[in-house]
Structure formats: C-alpha cells, structure tokens
Amino acid sequence: MASAGKVALVTGAGTGIGKAAALALLQEGYAVVLAGRRKDALETVAREAKPGASVLAVPTDVGDQASVRALFARTKETFGRLDVLFNNAGIGAPAGPLEDLPYEQWKAVVDTNLTGSFLCTQEAFKIMKSQDPRGGRIINNGSISAHAPRPGSVAYTSTKHAITGLTKTTALDGRKYDIACGQIDVGNAATPMTERMTKGVPQPNGTTMAEPVMAVDNVARAVVYMASLPLDANVLFMTVMATKMPFVGRG
C-alpha cells in the first residue's frame, strides 16, 4: 500500500467532512492525527477506525497558536513526520444582514477558518521541509463559498475567498521544499453543518428553497485521491458538489 508509513493530520476531524476524510485516510493505511475542539467527538471517530489503525486524537483550538503548536509537536513526537495536512476546520456565523454582524462573531469565524488554516500550514511547513524524505502535501477546504456567496454570509464567504489566496501562496512558497498545496471546494455535502439545505435556505432572489445534497463520502474519496498523488503532481483546485445544486449558471 503506497500510503503505508505515511502520516496525515485532519483538523475539524470530529464530525462531517473531517470525520469522513479521516476515516477514509485510515482505511487507506495512513496513520492519522485527529484534531478538533471536542475530545469526545474525536474519540468516537477513533473508535470507528478499522482494527489495527494508527490513530491519535488531539483536542485542539486551531485559532490558538499555542494549541496548534502543541498539536504539531505531539504529531512529530508520536509519528516522527507529517505527509498530509487537511485544513478542514471551519465554522460559520448565523445568516443575517452584513451591517448587523457582531464583531465577536466575525472574529470567531476569521480565527477558525483563516487564521487556523494559516497557523496549521506554518507548523506543517516546519516539519515537512526538514524531514527525510522531505516534503508533503497540504489540502485546504475552500468550499463553494470560495467562489460565490450565499445571502447573509459575509464572514464565512470572506474567509473562504481568503483560503484561495492561502492555497496559491502555499503552493508557490512550498515548491522549494517539495511541499504541494491544493484546495477542495465542496458544495452541499450531507453533514450536520448542511442539514438546513434540505429544509430550505435563502436564495439571492429573496426566496427560500430546499437544495440537493450529496453523500459526504464523495468528498472523502476526493481528499484521498489528492493525498495519494506523488509530490511532483498536484490538484490545485477541485470542486466536488451536488450535481443539481444552484451554483452553476443562474441556478
């Protein structure tokens, strides 16, 4: 198995896309570090891993630099290297008028989605550039919101547009260290975060409409594919979406 001996770290691994991707990577033979805020959720994922899988659960606040540094130190101490980082952790603010968004909610979304991805990328660079064999791969969860906003989503959409800049810069700055970076943009994967899609969400024309969703395993398989490439090849951007969701064209 090509992934044998390789180590992956997944943030936001307790639920949704992060959980699905972590379990898929474990199934492929990766040792996987599960990072997330809730220890109980991480331990539940660890229990779902296949027998004999190498898994480490580390409760982490990705928006806190000391917490992130401790996560990567624990990873290096346990496994000795890092081959794949999936920057998946993300939150949103309640939908509402841009002018009414509280500063505290704006800051919480920026701290988790953008600052958290940067801090994890920075620590991954430090390990990947100095290990032997050198290099590794970073995959960022961009979301469809990296391309087009939903009404009332200024904080989430702003951070996801910024992730695209982080992806491009990481891909460029990582070249000299054999570090590849790509972005997966997900549309309407069935997770607790998108449960409201099937009940009706606001549309740009002022109506509310239920939207199609897809199984989250489609995203997990795409992450495994991106992770499996040799370091001289890279998927810079991939969009995985529910086929009939209102995104392409005018919806």
Image (tube, rainbow, N blue to C red):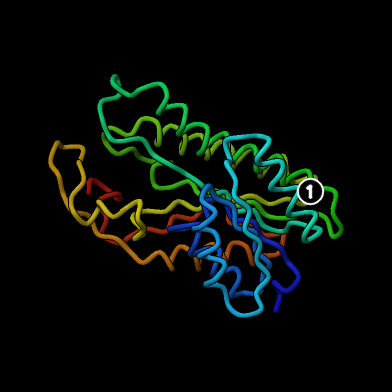
Of 168 and 209, which appears nearest the observer? 209
Q: Residue at x 47, y 44 (%)?
A: 90
The vertical placement of 38 against 33, above or below, is above
Element class at badge 1 = helix
Q: Residue 142: percent from the left, percent from the top? A: 48, 46
The answer to which image quadrant residue 218 occupies is: bottom left
Of 44 and 130, which appears nearest the observer? 44
Amino acid bearing label 1: Ile
Q: Residue 36: percent from the left, percent from the top? A: 55, 50
State the quadrant of the N terminus: bottom right
Q: Answer left or right for 237 relative to 145.
A: right
The vertical placement of 44 against 178, above or below, is below
Q: Answer left or right for 236 relative to 242.
A: right
Mark 1 surroundings: few (<14), some (14-19) or many (≥20) residues within 10 A: many
- How many numbered marks are there? 1
The residue at the far left in this view is 207
Q: Answer left or right for 43 relative to 134.
A: left
The vertical placement of 89 against 30, above or below, is above
Q: Residue at x 57, y 36 (%)?
A: 63
The answer to which image quadrant residue 158 occupies is: top left
The residue that mark 1 highlights is 127
The vertical placement of 82 against 25, above or below, is above
Q: Residue at x 18, y 50 (%)?
A: 200
Q: Residue at x 73, y 44 (%)?
A: 174
Q: Residue 107: percent from the left, percent from the top? A: 47, 27
Q: Residue 31: percent from the left, percent from the top? A: 68, 67
